[in-house]
Amino acid sequence: MIKRVLPTLALVLFTVLSNASLRASEEMKAIVASYLDIQSQLVADKTDAIKTQAHAIGEQAGKMGQPGADVAKAAGDLEQAGDIKAARRPLAR
């Protein structure tokens, strides 16, 4: 599962980075940091901080406007996840 998730999110992040202005660099740093925290939680089969981190991703992606829209949508879906299986689903797209 993780092997499918990482390339997909990496592609989304690359797309956002390549389309974002210089203003997005701080937002992207925050998004990547939160994403890595989420990945660590999922790898350890924990969900303690996932909703908080997903919310942070959504806020930062929202500041990016249209280039961050897909990331913000996935973060919103992740924030609504009720269990670990559901938390993994938004990242697998």
Image: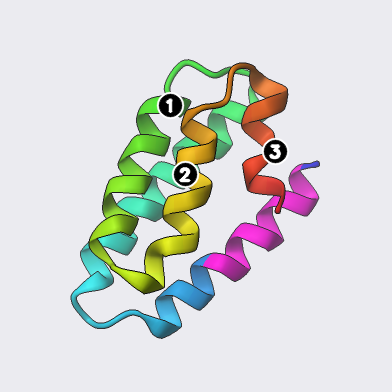
Q: Residue at x 64, y 23 (%)?
A: 44
Label whose residue precedes the other's in the sequence (3 or 1)? 1
- The residue singled out by tag 1 in the image is 51
Splitting the image into 4 quarters, where does residue 22 fall?
Answer: bottom left
Identify which amino acid the numbered label 2 is placed on.
Ala
Q: Determine if the magenta segment contains residue 4.
A: yes
Q: Position of residue 38 (x, y in %)?
A: 50, 35
Which stretch did the figure color magenta? 2-12
Q: Is 21 in front, or is 82?
A: 82
Q: Where 63 falls versus 73 (above or below)?
A: below
Q: Main secondary structure of the magenta part?
A: helix
Splitting the image into 4 quarters, where does residue 86 fall?
Answer: top right
Q: Residues within 10 Å of mark 3 (few under 14, many from 20)?
A: some
| Disc marking residue 75 | 2
Q: Residue at x 70, y 38 (%)?
A: 89
Side (left or right) of 60 relative to 77? left
